[in-house]
Image (spheres, rainbow, N blue to C red):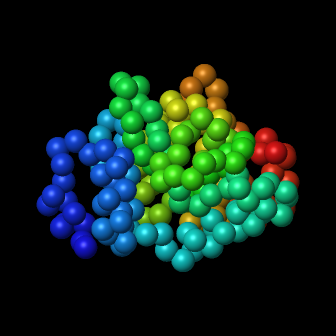
């Protein structure tokens, strides 16, 4: 089913259950919604994007972070300032403990969210999601560019706002230990 066909039957207020149904009907797109109700429809990530996510996952696993605390492209519920609930699908999530199975997991135990920039996602990943993740209280937010160096910008939460802790090429990051970045 195309995004156009899914959109034709869009309810006036989209819920996380609606998003789940839309994703089940349209395997060619990822659907997210802000806590204020703004719908985002994205194509699936490309090859380089997937390789970056795999390399980061392997780095975490090799350092001893349990597989049950790491997930790629899983939905998390994002509470809004005005009481709404949004749903975002970060490229990589690290929790402080294992989670129960579900499509839209709570944000309470999230230690780190990583977004890998794709053409067209820069604004939503670097502005919108950064603001939402900070308001949700996620301690760390990293953004990975798909430029030649694959620069990783690490944001740390302070007073419900992120500040940049460091920026380094992915290759450098992969030569560190996650414990150096408060990910134990």
User: In the picture shown, does residue 137 fall above or below 92?
Assistant: above
Q: Residue at x 71, y 56 (%)?
A: 68
Q: Quadrant of residue 109?
A: top right
The answer to which quarter of the image holds residue 22 is bottom left
With respect to residue 181, does 83 lie above or below? above
- 37 on left or right of 113: left
Residue displayed at 43% across by 65% down: 119
Q: Residue furthest front?
A: 100
Name above or below for residue 95 compared with residue 117: above
Q: Residue 70's spot in the image, x, y percent?
A: 68, 55
Q: Residue 153: where, in percent of width, then height?
A: 64, 49
Residue 46 or residue 75, whichever sits in front: 75
Q: Residue farthest to the top?
A: 159
Q: Outermost residue toward the bottom?
A: 47
Residue situated in front as seen by the camera: 40 or 74: 74
Tell me if I can see residue 41 in this picture. no
What quarter of the picture does the C terminus occupy? top right
Residue 41: horizontal and vertical position, in percent? 33, 59
Query: How many numbered circles does the render carry?
Result: 0
| x, y percent for residue 49 | 55, 69
Q: Nearer the viewer, residue 51 or 118?
A: 51
Using residue 182 as the reference point, say whether residue 127 is left or right of it. left
Split into 4 quadrants, where in the image is the N terminus?
A: bottom left
| Outermost residue, left side | 8
Q: Residue at x 66, y 69 (%)?
A: 54
| Residue depicted at 18% across the width and 48% down the height | 11
Residue 26 in view of the camera: yes
The answer to whether residue 12 is left or right of residue 118 is left
């Amino acid at each position: 089913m195309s995004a156009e066909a899914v959109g034709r039957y869009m309810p006036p207020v989209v819920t996380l259950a609606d998003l789940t149904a839309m994703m089940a009907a349209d395997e060619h797109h990822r659907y997210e919604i802000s806590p204020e109700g703004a719908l985002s429809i994205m194509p699936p990530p490309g090859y380089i994007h997937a390789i970056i996510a795999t390399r980061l996952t392997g780095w975490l696993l090799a350092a001893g972070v349990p597989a049950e605390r790491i997930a790629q492209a899983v939905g998390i519920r994002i509470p809004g300032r005005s009481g709404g609930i949004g749903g975002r699908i970060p490229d990589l999530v690290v929790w402080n403990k294992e989670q129960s199975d579900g499509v839209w997991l709570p944000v309470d135990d999230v230690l780190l969210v990583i977004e890998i920039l794709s053409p067209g996602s820069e604004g939503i990943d670097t502005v919108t999601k950064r603001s939402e993740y900070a308001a949700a209280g996620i301690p760390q937010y990293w953004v990975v560019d798909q430029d030649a160096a694959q620069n990783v910008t690490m944001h740390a939460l302070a007073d419900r706002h992120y500040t940049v802790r460091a920026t380094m090429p992915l290759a450098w990051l992969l030569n560190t230990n996650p414990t150096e970045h408060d990910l134990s």
